[in-house]
Amino acid sequence: MSASKRTATITLDGKTIDLPVHHGTTGPDVVDIRKLYAEGDVFTFDPGFTSTAACESGITYIDGDAGELLYRGYPIEQLAEQSSHLEVCYLLLYGELPTPAQLADFEGRVTRHTMVHEQMHYFFRGFRRDSHPMATMVGVVGAMSAFYHDSLDINDPWQREVAAIRMIAKLPTIAAMAYKYSIGQPFVYPKNSLDYASNFLHMCFAVPCEEYVVKPALAKAMDRIMMLHADHEQNASTSTVRLAGSSGANPFACIAAGIACLWGPAHGGANQACLEMLREIGTVDRIPEFIRRAKDKNDSFRLMGFGHRVYKNFDPRAKVMKESADEVLGLLGIENNETLKVAKELERIALEDEYFVSKKLYPNVDFYSGIILEAMGFPTSMFTPIFALSRTVGWISQWKEMIADPAQKIGRPRQLYVGPTRRDYIAIGAR
């Protein structure tokens, strides 16, 4: 960040306050309001922090108007076409694409950390058999701090590195264990001979009594899902991780907090909500009815999977995900699935209907990812855990960046107080 010669001037009760304006490498300039309270005795009011930059970051950049998503400057479309999830993990963590030797070393370190402490297996038994996998993940990831004492010191760069590798490696294992526990099947240990995405699918769908071979096209689709969800700037769960980390909390607690935030249906549950909407529509002949409802301001029905709070044009991840959806559904031979028919017709109508085009309600990444995950055999309860393990590297990268930032302070948002003013206590007998 660099200061420009421009300033923003605010006049309060005749007093003028000059606030510096800072440049990033791209995107809007920001007005530095840090001295506003000291000099003007006022705060800014910004519910949801949608117009507030709470930190400096060099990891991810989104241009919602242009439909652009960059990881460390690289367009997501190029990475999805030519890279892999673990290579993107390296990029997000360290800032540059790895050399072949660096990537091989990184993949080896992640692979050797995929197993969890054996005593963690018993931890799962404390949950009811019908527990939601996200509830299990929040608890188990938070409990990692009770097992890995040698990577809790956030002031030690090496311990931060070890914690980062552990979480990237172990979150797929924990997510798969949560899934297996929820369906009453035995845990499947990771296999070092498999790549990252194939290993996760194997842990989810293999059983001890027979051999399970992961189809390469499914592994590629899962790898893309992980890559496309790896980071997304200062969203709610990432901000939660940063806020928790600003207090000095250990990294496992911070990631558990991020998982808990991601669980919300307005954040990580969007692809599940989209698939449930497609099932509610049911058949192609009912689509016009739901299109009419979506246009009716007095109807509570919402068309899920279209439009995005950040992307005001198109979601750059959606095109990549659509290609994967076509590949996966073709491979599995389920192109005639009724839910898929509804999805394809709904997509066609939304792309041609003037109402949706004018409002730029294009299909987003959630519209396609839920279809892919269901086709693979995952229940909707696993959609958000898969999102969580995909986003882990982004959370960790943002956490490491925050820890290393000398300007970082403990998070402490202010408020516009609208409660009672000072009043005296009344004895209970006099009330």
Image (cartoon, grey):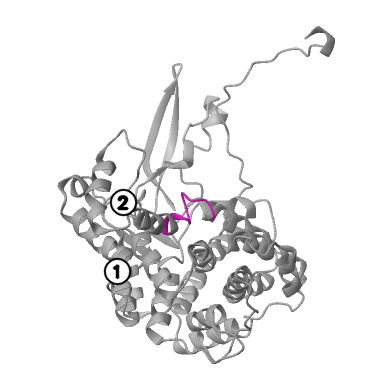
150 relative to 133, above or below = below
Q: Main secondary structure of the magenta part?
A: loop
Q: Please tell me which residue is depicted at 43% across the width and 77% down the height of the picture.
A: 223
Is residue 98 something that shows in the picture?
A: yes
Residue 83 part of the magenta segment: no
Label 2, residues with CA under 10 Å away: few <14, some 14-19, many ≥20:
many
* In the foreground, 318 or 180: 180
**Occupied quadrant, residue 294:** top left
Relative to residue 6, is residue 156 drawn left or right?
Answer: right
- Residue at label 1? 322
The quadrant of the image that shows the C terminus is top right
The dot on residue 307 is 2
Please state the extent of the stretch shown in magenta in the rendering: 263-271
**Occupied quadrant, residue 425:** top right
The spot of residue 75 in percent (x, y) is 33, 68
Q: CA distance from mark 2 to mark 1?
A: 15 Å
* In the foreground, 298 or 244: 298
Label 1, residues with CA under 10 Å away: few <14, some 14-19, many ≥20:
some
Question: Helix, strand or loop at disc 1?
Answer: helix
The spot of residue 136 in percent (x, y) is 65, 63
Relative to residue 308, is residue 106 drawn left or right?
Answer: right
Name the amino acid type tagged 1.
Answer: Lys
Q: Please tell me which residue is depicted at 50% across the width and 79% down the height of the picture.
A: 201
